[in-house]
Amino acid sequence: MSAFASSDDRLPLYQRLRDQMHEKIASGEWRPDEPIPTETELAQTHAIAVGTVRKAVDTLVAEGLLNRSQGRGTFVRRPQFDGSFFRFFRQVTAAGEHKVPESRILSHSLEAPPAAVRKALALEPGEAVVWLERVRMVNGHRVVREDIWLPASKFKKLLDVSPGAFGNLLYPFYEEICGQAVASATENLTVETADANTARALGIEPGLPVVVIERTALGYNRAPLEYRVSRGAAEGFRYQIDIF
Amino acid sequence: MSAFASSDDRLPLYQRLRDQMHEKIASGEWRPDEPIPTETELAQTHAIAVGTVRKAVDTLVAEGLLNRSQGRGTFVRRPQFDGSFFRFFRQVTAAGEHKVPESRILSHSLEAPPAAVRKALALEPGEAVVWLERVRMVNGHRVVREDIWLPASKFKKLLDVSPGAFGNLLYPFYEEICGQAVASATENLTVETADANTARALGIEPGLPVVVIERTALGYNRAPLEYRVSRGAAEGFRYQIDIF
DNA sequence: TAGTGGTCTAGACCACTTA
DNA sequence: AAGTGGTCTAGACCACTAG
């Protein structure tokens, strides 16, 4: 019954149940926004008490993989990218402040991956990538410039779509066109000075500071799906953390 | 959040207990690294079941205010600043990589607070501040330059200490000398270009990007204790987040 | 050995959602 | 009204720590 490695029998029941449920989410057996079996069902099928099931569900809720909704059920959570660094590029629109940037794909093509991309996507030697050039704009002003690389083996269908037909949000698009759902991501923030190309792309002076965000996005099975490098003018960027 | 007001009677028992325990930590009645009463004791004094106490403790553990230790007890956690932005200034020491920077206080004095400081520390009009100038160094190389402001009402004893006698870590020092314990902090990261002063202080060229970290540190009673602005060369800075 | 937190159970009742 | 998750209880037994 256990898909791959069953969890250690010496672990507490609720941990073992947690691992099994995690596996069902990772494997896609339980899909995002779908309700999982009720707590009493899970208790019966695993022949354990409801309280133990609750504890397993609790941990997965705490980890952010599940959402409870009283009276409705418990649901697999769709990943939220609200915490991404991008939220912290202040779009000083003069008028309304919280303007969502529009995105435009400048070009897409099949390429041989640079070394950094091949490493980030854990590609086999010789495997090609789909390369997207993209800009994010506010009021027609270019705010962020992005290079996006995707394994061609999973994403070559994107090349059949005209750049203008790409939506504002890429991840639902990936899922719709290529059946690849993003489950998590890691972002790295660094700072560099704008070279001539970047300065032109962002409409700023060369030499000004630029915030660089590298993102590697993973699917539910932990396989790298996307590697993305984004650059935006550092002016107006602000990121906050809380320490306890 | 709840400052003093006792929690709402309509809330679940475990929530109300959680709020009361939070209050005891915030007020300093339960001190860091000290064990809190046992779960059975709490259950008896509040006339509720142990399971309910466990749930209240669980939430505080999840929030990071308590640490459980099987067989020993449950303890008030000392705040950990491991997650601070400062960890992400890579100290490229050529030799060993993870060198802890040494700190030196350049000067301390009693000052009238600039407007930004008065706001951050929520000072009364006319209240003075203690101002510290500080550098962090690796291998004699200045890595970070800091301005630190503290309410004089609580920290004027620091002026009696010679700058050389300040320790490498300020927060234990604050607690020792002034009896003020830091419980939490908020940090904001922005980027600017080095002006002449900053460039000289950091030993870099003017105009190069500088990472600016503003930190407001709070005591257990949520009162602002310290406002700090730190600047370091953006080169070698890298910060990572994970998104789920 | 005594006392702590950790796991697990079984069941009662409440609050909310949907139909 | 039926079914879901939410709260609360009471008690058994286990695992770890300290004296």
Image (cartoon, coloured by chain):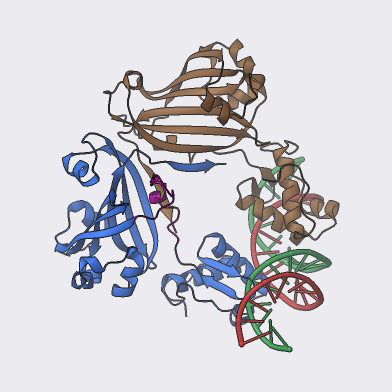
Chain colours: A blue, B brown, C red, D green
Q: Position of residue A153 (x, y in %)?
A: 22, 70
Does residue A118 show up magenta in the picture? no
Q: Position of residue A78 (x, y in %)?
A: 46, 67
Image quadrant assignment for residue B233: top left
A166, above or below B93, in the image: below
Q: Position of residue A232 (x, y in %)?
A: 30, 45
Q: Position of residue A83 (x, y in %)?
A: 45, 53
Q: Residue at x 70, y 46 (%)?
A: B2
- For the magenta stretch, what is the residue range? A79-101
Q: Residue at x 66, y 50 (%)?
A: B60
B185, above or below A31, in the image: above
Asked whether B225 or A208 is in front, the reply is: A208
Asked whether A164 or B43 is in front, the reply is: A164
Q: Residue at x 48, y 69 (%)?
A: A22
Q: In this orientation, does residue A223 appear?
A: no
Asked whether A96 or B234 is in front, the reply is: A96
> Which secondary structure type mostly characterizes the magenta part of the structure?
loop
Q: Residue at x 22, y 73 (%)?
A: A157
User: What quarter of the picture does the C terminus of chain A occupy?
Assistant: top right
Does residue A81 show up magenta in the picture? yes
Image quadrant assignment for residue B189: top left
